[in-house]
Image (cartoon, rainbow, N blue to C red):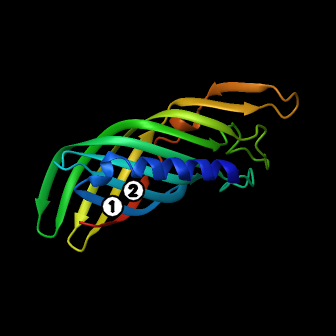
Amino acid sequence: MRRTAHILLAAAVLLLLGREARAQTALLGVFQSPKGIGLTAMLDAAKGKETNILTLRTDFYGFLSGRTRDIGACLTYTHDYYFYRRESEGVRLALHAGAGGMVGYAHDHEKGFFSSFDRQLDRGPGFVVALTGQAGVRLDFRRHITVDLSFSACPGIHLRSDSNTGAMLLSFFKSGIYCVYYPQINIMYRFR
């Protein structure tokens, strides 16, 4: 787990140091969702019609319900386009949508969340590689504060080892689809 977190953090730093680091507006803040908590960086392109969103977060699947003690980690990148903007006194609203990818180490969805028995997760955590589609609304306030509410789908694959045989198992990452209705809230500070 610790090694995975270091790899994801290094990847996030490398992405931020790329050519988009010279963006017109840079935002940094916290990510909050039933999916997990973490840090988000949003880098707007110079023309203001698109943005790059990089999120390093924990993965809470099974942890909040008491089904496991393991917390996962995910790194998500999306390139979003603004397709609607509206400005009024003190606030600017923008709708955005885009695509990207996600890598991480997390548990996948298992049946039994609403069962009447205390049920622990049967399968262990594994590596996740997924595509990401995201849509959201961004509110920019006067005092350099931005609130972004979004939803994302992450169809992908989940690679884990079987605890009984040690065999590597590859499956569809169901949590990426089943948790699409979980809201994601970013509260960020705009540096420009």
Q: Secondary structure at mark 2?
A: strand
Q: Position of residue 82 (x, y in %)?
A: 22, 44
| Label annotation for residue 161 | none
Q: Residue at x 43, y 43 (%)?
A: 77
The answer to which of 111 and 106 lies nearer the viewer is 106
- Residue 65 falls in image quadrant: bottom right
Amino acid at circle 1: Leu
In the picture, measured across the screen, residue 31 lies left or right of residue 146, that is right
Q: Are marks 1 and 2 in contact (CB under 8 Å)?
A: yes
* Residue denoted by label 2: 41
Q: Badge 1 local density, few (<14 within 10 Å), some, or many (20+)?
A: some
First along the sequence among labels 1 and 2: 1
Q: Position of residue 70 (x, y in %)?
A: 72, 52
Q: Position of residue 58 (x, y in %)?
A: 58, 54
In the picture, measured across the screen, residue 165 lies left or right of residue 108, that is right
Question: Compared to 85, does 164 lie above or below?
Answer: above
Question: Compared to 166, does 88 lie above or below?
Answer: below
Q: Residue at x 16, y 48 (%)?
A: 47
Q: Residue at x 26, y 70 (%)?
A: 144
Q: Badge 2 local density, few (<14 within 10 Å), some, or many (20+)?
A: many
Can you see residue 61? no
Point out the residue furthest to the right here.
164
Amino acid at circle 2: Ala
Q: Secondary structure at mark 1?
A: strand
Question: Compared to 111, does 66 lie above or below?
Answer: below
* Residue denoted by label 1: 27
Can you see residue 16? yes
Q: Residue at x 46, y 48 (%)?
A: 14
